[in-house]
Image: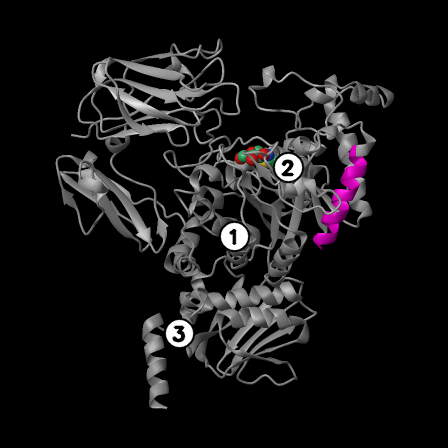
Amino acid sequence: MIRHLLTLVATLLLVGGPAGAAAQNIVPAVRDYEKRNGVFTILTTTKITHYPELRSLAKYLAESLPLSLREYNGESGGDIVLRLNKNLADEEYRLSVTPEGIVIEGGAYGGAFNGVETLLQLLPAKVYSGDMPLPVMVGCCEVEDAPRFTYRGFMLDVCRTWMTADEVKGFISVLAHHKINKLHLHLSDDEGWRVEILSHPELAEVGGFRGGDSPVAAIYGKWGERYGGYYTQQQLRDIVDYAAVRNIEIIPEIDLPGHSRDMARVMPEVLCNYTPSLAASDGYDTRNVLCAAKESNYALLKDILGEIAAIFPSRYLHIGGDEVDFSQWMSCPDCKALMQARGMSEGEQLQAYFMGRVAAMVEELGKVPGVWNEAVAGSRFTRNSQVYGWESIAAARKAAAEGYPTVVMPGQYFYFDMRQSAREDGHIWAAIFDARKCYSFDFAEQGFTPEEMRSVQGVEASFFSEAYISHRDMKPDYLYYMTYPRICSLSEIGWCGDGRAWDDFYGRLTAGHYSRLVAMGVGFRLFPPKVSYADGRLTASTDDHSRIYYTVAGEENGTEHEYTGPITTGKPQLYAFRSRFGEAVSPEAGVEARFRMSQPKVTVTSSIPPSTKYPYTNAASYDGRIAYTGRTCHNGDWVLYTFDEPVRCRRMEIRTGYIQLPRCIFEQGYMEVSEDGETFRRVCDLQNGIGVVDAPRHAIKAVRIVSTKDGNGAAFVTLQSPWVYPVLE
Ligand code: TNX
């Protein structure tokens, strides 16, 4: 008994009081939380008592709380009880913690699941690391809660970057803790086909791989090797089951009729009956649109979609419809004849025809077609489809106004492949935004009318993975860094919507939720520390319980020191700060001068003639600081950068390829520097088309990169002006 008491006291000390005190830190926030007096103590002998329909939920809970299960027989004293209550909406739940026990009631499985997730958040964060010490106390409370939207989704692109079934499951498990209930799986795209199709096995067996000996050329990294993978139908069923236990519905997407280059490389007969010239397409094979006039294509899609529908029990089957390039249809004799016969003049109309026929197949399979907003841009093909509004807020509103059930996901708030601040990794086409800006998304402020809101099913964020592939080896946490805590913001918008101020949310995140993410093993992004410099003192601070570290320019190996108080220095630009919390890390922060780049005058010459549109002269004036070569590179080709004046710097990078999407690069090669412009010294091999010289001892007069490989899959190479990091002194 005494031992028992001691353990209790120890647990109490460990978690700093009854765990119910953390209720304010629930993410997403609960609708009603009432604190009551007393605690319930979960002992090793406590049982999880459940309705027969909730057996898999009870097992799920037992993975976090190692308790034995028992089927409900009307008695419940001393237990954690999982029940259904038909008076509640499906995803609604009540959670009651009294000194006698814990009762979770859900309208349906999903409701009970949501209650279980809230219960986990009432426990110490350790519960997420799978070794929860018992006994543990839970503060008494009454919770009543229900989601704002029935659709709280996330889209994962497993095509551009291949993720194994286990990686997908790992990702699902964290989504589930945020009460996200849909995972939209982007299973086909130009660079990969990821689902086994028994009636056409070559789609996955050949099209699941790119590069190497595959007919599918690589565009986004791993250029030189055969790369990829696919899920067997069995693996997908297993993922579906795994997700279902976690109240997540998997919505499969086959992206049609565009984004189908991979399919077209495996089955060239799906293309239009004419061969467009590739000369105008930068060497990138743009023939990625299925011919709309070939009956054989509809037969093929019927086979494919039939199998997809059988694998995924979801109500929805997403058939894509984004970014269709109509130029091939417009030059195809068969498409032209079809358009003429049906009195069409625009590409949109033919797209509506195509999507309409495919949507009808989906409906015949008993499902609701999901489509990207472009699919309904022109003529409407069917009301019975769910529209994913991604291009803009206007596009999402338009679909909603027209009465389509609409999932709202404008890129500038919900595309988590976007950069989180100016100097970090990621795309920029939609915006640069962090979890705070994502959280600020407000339907009313964005002009959604009450009428439009009736069509809004919910929200979805996405992770498109073009850039992931080139970061993954060096940054294993990239996916989680890009998506958390932005998914926390998404989950709250979807769960309880606007009206709660950022400060309240941020308080819950940092005081409670960050620790949960750490216990889940998520390497997420912290907000950067605030840095200021005044009166010779350099100060860094955070308000998220993280620790701050700093490096000093010029110190060997970039040693990290822990920051413990203001640094007295006349050279604040030497210091870079970063905060850390578990595996989580912030981007670097410091005084502005720390990050300034110099732009010395430079002349670019090359063994490759320049493109006429973006020649080497005045490269610096191009948006994105890019010039193009006039052809692809050959083995031995070189580009020479000669500076007007020798450049002293702490680091110089020569980058080929476009920022973040290194496609048109020197795929293999090396970099040389010269102090006099005549004798060159080899300094490194290029990696991902980038060469780096760190801490050069002398001023650099010229740099040269040399290709050691023919071609790069594109018709040219893009060149960025040198990235010159000035000496900090
Ligand atoms: C647009 S979102 C796309 C994707 C890209 C993404 C990159 C959508 C329907 N199409 O093909 O991967 O941007 O952010």
Q: Is residue 641 above or below residue 684?
A: above
Could one spot residue 33 in this view of the protein? Answer: no
Q: For the magenta stretch, what is the residue range?
A: 297-313
Q: Amino acid at mark 3?
A: Pro
Q: CA distance from mark 1 to mark 2?
A: 34 Å
Where is residue 620? Give x, y as percent. Answer: 37, 16
Q: Are marks 1 and 2 in contact (CB under 8 Å)?
A: no
Identity of the residue drawn at 63% across and 62% down = 91
Indicate whether residue 309 is drawn in magenta: yes
Q: CA distance from mark 3 to mark 1?
A: 35 Å
Q: Are marks 3 and 1 in contact (CB under 8 Å)?
A: no
Where is residue 222? Give x, y as percent. Answer: 48, 35
Question: In the depicted view, which residue is nearer to us: 300 or 207?
Answer: 207
Residue at the spot of label 1: 167
Disc number lying in front (3 or 1): 1
Instruction: Tell me the SS state at disc 3.
Output: loop
Residue at the spot of label 2: 397
Q: Going from the N terminus, do you reach mark 2 or mark 3 first?
A: 3
Residue at the spot of label 3: 18
Could one spot residue 191 in this view of the protein? Answer: yes
Q: Quadrant of the C terminus?
A: top left
Q: Residues within 10 Å of mark 3 (few under 14, many from 20)?
A: many
Question: How are the residues colored?
Answer: one colour
Disc number lying in front (2 or 3): 3
Instruction: Tell me the SS state at disc 2.
Output: helix
Q: Which image quadrant is residue 606 in?
A: top left
